[in-house]
Image (cartoon, coloured by chain):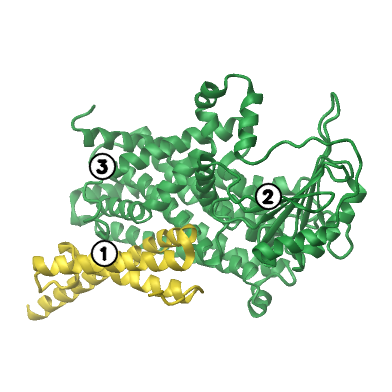
Amino acid sequence: MPLPALTHWPDVILLSSIVLLAGLVLICLSIKRHFSQWFPERKLVRSVAMALRVAGYALVIGATALLIQAEGWGVGLPLLCGIVPVAAFAISMLTTWRANALRAAALARRRRRA
Amino acid sequence: MIGSFRQSMTWLHTWVGLIVCWILYFMFVTGTLGYFDSEIDRWMQPEQAPSPQTSFADAVAVARTRLVDEAMGAERWFITPPDEREHPHLEIFWQMPREEGEDIVRGNEDIDLATGEPLGEPVRATGGGQVLYRMHYILHYIDRAITYPYLIGLITLIMFIGMVTGVIIHRNIFRDFFTFRLSQGQRSWLDMHNMLSVTSLPFQLMITYSGLIFMVLNWMPGIALGSYGFDTSVADEVVAEATGNVPLEASGTPAELVDFAPIIADASARWGSDSLGRMEVRHPGDAASQITLYRQEDASRIPSRVIYSGVTGEVLDDREDYIIGPIKVASTFLGLHEGLFAGTLLRWFYFLSGLLGTGMIATGAIHYTSKRRKRNENEPQSRGYRFVECLNIGTIMGLPVGIAAYFLANRLLPLGMADRAAWEVHCMFLVWGACLLYPLVRSRIDAWRDLAALAAGAFALVPVINMLTTDNAHLLVTLPAGNWILAGFDLTALAAALFFGTAAWLIGRKRASMKTAPEASPRAAARADALA
């Protein structure tokens, strides 16, 4: 079955950027340290981590395939290498910020109780 | 070997990185700006609007009239019609046959499409974005025969060693992919250095490796010598054959040059009329004349081409694979490095990736001092440490100030000034030089904050001075008109101002916390005293 024709940016690039971002978020959450930064109360079970990782890589590969299908190898791969750092940078900054905010909130709660 | 393999690689990474980090920072900054060289050219020449877009055939017709007047009997003509980016004007180039004992006569002109005459001298003499971009690979004030390929090649080689050792010593390359721990001093700088390097690793590896490919024949002459001996004419022949650039002798019999229109129509039918790139005419007016039409370039830098007879107009050669595989591979690397094929979006990603590389070098250099400061907290600063610290501050913050000064000089130096273009560059290096000296007379954190604030101010001034010195190239005009090349430049300058302003604010906050909380630890107190 031929893939739907998505050959004009920004639609295809926007779509694959979102898929890529989602994939990287899942991969990030599959790592213990980052999972606890987002959900300090919960524990990451191994099977969940595996599922997150597989789904994450699948989305990243899907986004890569989409970019190459729409833009060709010559432009698709450079685009991928351009989008990944931006997405990864955003995710790690958000993760740090989230962990900081949670820690500050926890501190404030403890102070109120005391 | 010092200790384990990984330890010795860490040693190597640290010291090769330290030796070249400042010049690499310079190469990364100028190279990153180089992705927008044509846009910077445009901003620095506000009086000279690009030629209107016209059809390939019309532009070539104008060029032909001029070349017939100026350069009949030439060995070759090159005609490059104006496009959206790299070539704002119709460009012609010609090369006359070599006369015995004389230099080859060459000429090139930008042609006004309306009059067919060469464009006059620009109102505003400037080096533009090209000078900035050329610094990326030939530096400045140093003989280019030394810098390219030898000095720059050596630095690139060291950069490559830095990349490979960096990958080896980074223990948890996947697990730490997203890791950034805030407010932990040295640890935070290392996290940031790792994150910037690893996320953009494909780009950084590609850009360094392809940078080396540019100079491969200079650095590995043995391969060519071993295969073809010392007689360079043999190697030249092989290269000509491999690149499809076979020499063509004139027959000496005059013949009328063919009409270009059917040739252009044929090429348009092959690739579409929007995809025509440039045209080469060899031995115009000779019976052996040939015309080559090139398609616009893609990532591989090897455009499709068709060779026509220059007398009858018939197709002589339309092979797609006229270049051998190894050259294609090399050329693809060069094409990826230069990114000339990139459209607007991909160009911005190139720019961002370049900035990430710049950040990678900067954070690595800062990590070096941050780690040693902690280790030697209770000892007096060594001279070597202080030297590294001053160079770090003066380069990482000082070079951007210098570049802002380069743009400001473009607007503020008087138009009729002698050597104006050269003085723009002098301004850049004078300002950078002053920034390099400044940390000598200030404490570390003050120097960081002051220079960051200076960079913020200088970049914020760029659109303001632009508004005061030009009539129709500033944001109030370019934004409503949707002129994104000129507006984009000013907005990028504002973004840079915002970035450096934030940095100055954060450093100032840290400075305040260092001053107000000395009782927190005796070490911090000692440090605050030393800084005060």
Q: Which residue is mark 3?
A: B169
Q: Earlier in the sequence, mark 2 or mark 3?
A: 3
**Image hue for chain B:** green
Q: Amino acid at mark 2?
A: Glu
Chain ID of residue with mark 1: A
User: Quadrant location of residue B288?
Assistant: top right
In this view of the protein, which residue sits in the foreground, B47 or B184?
Answer: B47
In this view of the protein, which residue sits in the foreground, B482 or B296?
Answer: B296
**Image hue for chain A:** yellow
SS class, disc 1: helix
Q: Quick one: which residue is furthest to the left in this view?
A: A114
Q: Amino acid at mark 1?
A: Tyr
Q: Which residue is mark 1?
A: A57
Q: In the drawing, what numbered circle is on residue B424?
A: 2
Q: Tell me how far mark 2 sits from mark 1, CA to CA.
A: 50 Å
SS class, disc 2: helix
Q: Amino acid at mark 3?
A: Ile
Residue drawn at point x = 50 percent, y = 23 percent: B222
Front label number (3 vs 1): 1
Residue B142 appears anywhere in the view? no
